[in-house]
Amino acid sequence: MLDVLIAAHDHPTAAQVLDRVREHQPGIGAATVYRTLSLLVEAGQARVLSLGEGASARYDANVSRHDHVLCVDCGAAMDVAAPLPARALADMASRTGYDLIEYDVQFRGRCPSCNKAHRKQSKTNEKRNRSV
Amino acid sequence: MLDVLIAAHDHPTAAQVLDRVREHQPGIGAATVYRTLSLLVEAGQARVLSLGEGASARYDANVSRHDHVLCVDCGAAMDVAAPLPARALADMASRTGYDLIEYDVQFRGRCPSCNKAHRKQSKTNEKRNRSV
DNA sequence: TAGATATTGAGACGCAGTCTCAATATCGAT
DNA sequence: ATCGATATTGAGACTGCGTCTCAATATCTA
Ligand SMILES: [Mn+2]
Ligand SMILES: [Mn+2]
Ligand SMILES: [Zn+2]
Ligand SMILES: [Zn+2]
């Protein structure tokens, strides 16, 4: 199952992981996959990502510090590095009084293909509005 | 209801907003509050925050770009500014091919009071481990 | 005032994720 | 190999957040 996660570079949801695992192990139950994902996260072998409210949890076998760019249309999530300057975490800690452990940066926008579709859509809307 | 949100500086969940609104307007239904929150967000009068998977959505009347520090123990969320350098968004856009709209930084750690409790707890654990 | 339209709240519903528990598999000692 | 003890598994009940439906009510408008 970790293999499935490692092979996946698209930050799959638990349901997607389940589907993919079932290709190799058809009888496996959902509970087992959810359980195992939680264990992997707890053991530091995987990360959970919250990519926006309402969206379901997504899993990432890449546990090193990195950030994500998310397409607001199709939900595609790609890895990206946006490290803050070395001092930033300590500065923030002393400024807030919190004992800080980690941080993440999340970019939101439109992936190239959704972007193309979106531009076309806007143009159509303009036309329709004019003709009405 | 916007007033309630504006008065709240703790990034309340929908349920908390509901409770607070009910103090002034006891009969109001949950559906109305959920609906109105969504409308406020859509109208740009409020923001929704995803502060970690499993956590419920939290609302923020501060719609200007800012970031958050989250306590992993008690869930307290405070505002913080961690702006990326001006070019960063554009750079990231050209590097990824995405058309980027926005970004957020999220820090995770322990707030002062949870931190104190946590240290005490660790010490206790050490003692217990030694004595076992 | 009467009718059309919009807003409301109760509760049904949907869905992701967790929990329960009986069935099954794995282990360890003999 | 055989037995009992222990751990893992999968089906499905359950939970909590949020949305949808719809009848009731409030608000416009002629
Ligand atoms: Mn990643
Ligand atoms: Mn805020
Ligand atoms: Zn896309
Ligand atoms: Zn705290």
Image (tube, coloured by chain):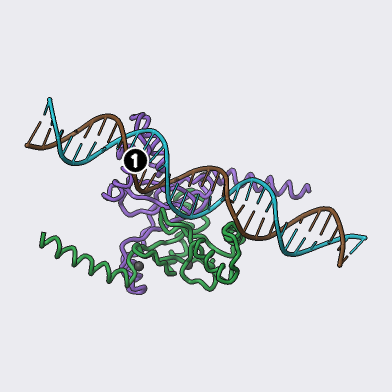
Chain colours: A green, B purple, C cyan, D brown
Q: Give percent across and percent down for residue A80.
A: 43, 69
Q: Residues within 10 Å of mark 1 (few under 14, many from 20)?
A: many
Tell which of C22 and B27 is nearer to you.
C22
Which quadrant does the N terminus of chain A fall into?
bottom right
Q: Quadrant of residue A21?
A: bottom right
Above or below: residue A84 compared with residue B119: below
Does residue A97 appear anywhere in the picture? yes
Residue shown at 59% from the left, 65% from the top: A45
Q: Is residue B46 left or right of residue C30?
A: left
Tell which of B65 and D20 is nearer to you.
D20
Residue shown at 59% from the left, 60% from the top: A29
> Dot 1: what SS?
helix
Tell which of A21 and B13 is nearer to you.
A21
Disc 1 target residue: B5
| Callout 1: chain | B
Residue shown at 47% from the left, 53% from the top: B52
Q: Quadrant of residue B32?
A: top left
Which quadrant does the C terminus of chain A fall into?
bottom left
Q: Give percent across and percent down for residue A100.
A: 51, 54
Q: Is residue A40 left or right of residue C6?
A: right
